[in-house]
Image (tube, helix red, strand yellow):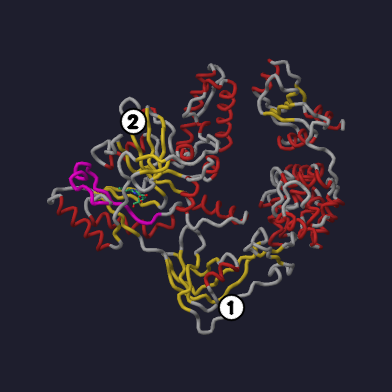
């Protein structure tokens, strides 16, 4: 979709942008068919934000920019449901499903009817109320009669429309019910992040979805990438809006809701069973978890006549799939070293098929988990595939006759370096940053945005540098020649030159970045800044005792211990000396205070600068005490313009704000 707004007034521009953004959100989040790149999408949102920033009166509650309220709330309000949110009776096997079907046929006196079969997604149900075409309230199931108002959080779910414009005239008020789910990828990513931060893992995507919806901070929900699949459309009294369930699903889908396309109408129970079997065989191929199939009588009139038992409708049933568990023997336990240095014990299993996939390994997470299970090598265990890609050991079924205990190695199985398990922590780690298993991750961290910012040092390049032995510690990056870089696969002379310059220029970053780049556990940018302020030089930090380290702001015993241990490792000392020799900043000079060269000045960056990236420029300005703002206003001191500078440049001219280029900025910065 091409887009031009320049000729329109701000109100029309904003509305037009909103419509375009909604269209692309629907393509991306609901249909999984993006038409534009993420960058182009971000650009549209930024354009809208700019207009709304300049004209706050134009902001509408359903604007795509209004998904995150951002404020922390006191707790959740209890809200009664318009009609009870019931659960379903379960059919545990085909016979039970046939029995359900026989009952339906009997109650309907043999009149013809159809079923709608849908996948039973494993999440939590949520009711969403719309009024005058806008999302007004989202309520969790709760106890079925009363739920919790999670509106602010639900608004961050991108597949849930904030407005349904075409529905307003005909249906001023309606309620949608459906399932909040977290897909496997988001779940894996969340757990990996939690593990890294030493938080407990969520057991499965359903718990993760529930935990993410019921947090008091909407921006956390937003970051968790939840999805919403609609499966009911009701009026305000809780009665269906249409006379057939299928029609409701079609209407929802046409009006922007995500409705699972894997649904069918079935003429009889045999067709329904085919649907159940088909998806049981394919469930692992789905991007989200399902635990069965829901079968509903399609006609609402027939639903009404079938009625309800005390807890569930008589016109619907959940066909539950068998738990994906299997019994097998643990033949050995080995240890893997992860990218963060964590030693993870892995159970080797006598191979068994679980829901169509052969399982021969299962993670045991850490020593405590093995103790909790009471597991020894040779035992027979129950293994389950749940949300994780990697199956897990649920419990010991039978102790082996020749069982033997597992012991965590005292040395890293990859590099032979020292491993440490800190007090109160479950994870044992290799602390040698040059351990080959860790090296790639260390480089990735070192080069990442906001740290040393070495653009172009991606995974493919890192792999080659380490595998060819060109880099054995991050410090070796500074010894690489242009020719060596140009010799890598898929690296032309131009990109090699760019990468070389990027690496070279990263030497000039201020000392807090160097501290953060070392990848010491618990030491991010903020702590690095405090350490730099307190000690003034990297050598002093490296020599400091635990007690001295704790004198820096926000450094407690745990962080101090981590820093102290890091610098006691001879290989880390060696790394430090090499980085010093490469001329990185080991002294703290520029303070982020108003007393810097640029103290009191506010800059706005626009366009592409010839050598500095946005991040670099921003960092340098801030290190020198200046501020960087995103929009041009009368408070702006300078606009730094590069190629393709856009509206900010015209705004600067309009407000008569001095416009400078990169060379002039560097000039200002050099006057220290
Ligand atoms: S219908 C009264 N349809 O499964 C009707 N439920 O025990 C109840 N679920 O609480 C819901 N996918 O959380 C329905 N396509 C689907 C579903 C579905 C998942 C969940 C829902 C409900 C539970 C049934």
Q: Which disc number belongs to residue 405?
A: 1
Q: Position of residue 59 (x, y in %)?
A: 51, 24
Q: Nearer the viewer, residue 338 or 406?
A: 406
Residue 28 visible within the image: no
Q: Which disc number belongs to residue 150?
A: none
Per the image, label 1 sits on a secondary structure element best described as loop
Magenta region: which residues?
Answer: 290-310
Label 1 neighbourhood size at 10 Å, few (<14), some (14-19), many (20+)?
Answer: few
Q: Position of residue 503 (x, y in %)?
A: 78, 45
Q: Nearer the viewer, residue 217 or 551?
A: 551
Tell me: is circle 1 under 8 Å from ligand 1. no
Per the image, label 2 sits on a secondary structure element best described as strand
The residue indicated by pointer 2 is 173
- In the image, residue 661 sits, relative to residue 445, either above or below, namely above
Q: Position of residue 628 (x, y in %)?
A: 71, 30
- In the image, residue 450 sits, relative to residue 364, either above or below, namely above
Tell me: is circle 2 under 8 Å from ligand 1. no
| Pointer 1 or 2: first along the chain | 2
Question: Which residue corresponds to the image point at 30% horizontal and 27% vertical from the top-left?
Answer: 170
């Amino acid at each position: 979709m091409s887009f031009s707004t320049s000729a329109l007034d701000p109100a029309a521009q904003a509305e037009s942008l909103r419509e375009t953004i909604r269209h692309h959100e629907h393509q991306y989040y609901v249909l999984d068919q993006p038409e534009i790149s993420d960058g182009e999408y971000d650009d549209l949102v930024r354009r809208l934000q700019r207009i709304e920033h300049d004209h706050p009166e134009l902001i509408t509650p359903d604007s795509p920019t209004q998904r995150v309220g951002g404020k922390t709330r006191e707790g959740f309000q209890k809200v009664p449901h318009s009609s009870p949110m019931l659960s379903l009776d379960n059919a545990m096997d085909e016979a039970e499903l046939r029995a359900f079907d026989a009952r339906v046929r009997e109650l309907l006196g043999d009149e013809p009817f159809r079923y709608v079969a849908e996948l039973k997604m494993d999440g939590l149900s949520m009711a969403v109320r719309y009024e005058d075409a806008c999302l007004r309230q989202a309520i969790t199931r709760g106890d079925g009669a009363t739920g919790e108002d999670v509106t602010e959080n639900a608004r961050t779910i991108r597949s849930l429309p904030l407005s349904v414009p075409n529905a307003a005239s005909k249906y001023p008020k309606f309620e949608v019910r459906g399932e909040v789910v977290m897909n496997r990828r988001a779940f894996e990513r969340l757990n990996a992040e939690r593990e890294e931060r030493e938080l407990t893992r969520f057991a499965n995507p359903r718990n993760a979805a529930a935990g993410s919806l019921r947090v008091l901070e909407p921006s956390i929900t937003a970051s968790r990438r939840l999805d919403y699949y609609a499966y009911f459309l009701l009026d305000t009294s809780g009665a269906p809006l249409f006379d057939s369930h299928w029609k409701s699903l079609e209407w929802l889908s046409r009006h922007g809701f995500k409705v699972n396309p894997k649904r069918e109408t079935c003429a009889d129970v045999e067709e329904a069973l085919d649907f159940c079997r088909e998806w049981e065989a394919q469930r692992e191929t789905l991007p989200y978890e399902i635990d069965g199939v829901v079968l509903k009588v399609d006609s609402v009139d027939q639903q009404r006549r079938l009625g309800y038992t005390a807890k569930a409708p008589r016109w619907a049933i959940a066909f539950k799939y068998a738990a994906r568990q299997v019994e097998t023997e643990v033949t050995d336990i080995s240890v893997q070293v992860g990218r963060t240095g964590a030693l993870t014990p892995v159970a080797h299993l006598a191979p068994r098929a679980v829901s169509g996939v052969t399982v021969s390994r299962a993670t045991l997470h850490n020593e405590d988990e093995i103790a909790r299970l009471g597991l020894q090598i040779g035992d027979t265990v129950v293994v389950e595939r749940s949300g994780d890609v990697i199956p897990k050991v649920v419990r010991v079924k039978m102790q082996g006759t020749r069982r033997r205990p597992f012991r965590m190695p005292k040395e890293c199985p990859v590099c032979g370096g020292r491993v440490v398990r800190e007090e109160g922590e479950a994870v044992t780690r290799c602390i040698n940053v040059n351990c080959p298993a860790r090296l790639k991750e260390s480089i990735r961290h070192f080069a990442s945005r906001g740290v040393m910012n070495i653009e172009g040092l991606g995974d493919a390049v890192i792999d080659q540098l380490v595998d060819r032995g060109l880099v054995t510690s991050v410090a070796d990056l500074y010894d690489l020649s242009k020719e060596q870089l140009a010799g890598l696969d898929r690296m032309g002379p131009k990109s090699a030159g760019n990468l070389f310059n990027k690496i070279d220029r990263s030497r000039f970053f201020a000392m807090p970045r160097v501290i953060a780049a070392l990848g010491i556990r618990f030491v991010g940018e903020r702590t690095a800044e405090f350490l730099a302020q307190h000690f003034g030089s990297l050598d002093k930090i490296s020599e400091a005792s635990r007690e001295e380290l704790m004198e820096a702001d926000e450094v407690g015993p745990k962080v101090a211990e981590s820093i102290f241990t890091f610098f006691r490792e001879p290989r880390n000392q060696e790394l430090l000396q090499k980085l010093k020799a490469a001329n990185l900043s080991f002294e703290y000079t520029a303070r982020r205070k108003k007393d810097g060269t640029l103290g009191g000045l506010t800059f706005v960056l626009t366009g592409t600068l010839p050598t500095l990236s946005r991040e670099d420029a921003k960092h340098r300005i801030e290190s020198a005490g200046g501020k960087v703002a995103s929009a041009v206003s009368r408070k702006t001191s300078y606009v730094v313009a590069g190629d393709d500078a856009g509206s900010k440049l015209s705004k600067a001219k309009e407000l008569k704000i001095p416009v400078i280029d990169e060379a002039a900025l560097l000039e200002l910065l050099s006057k220290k």
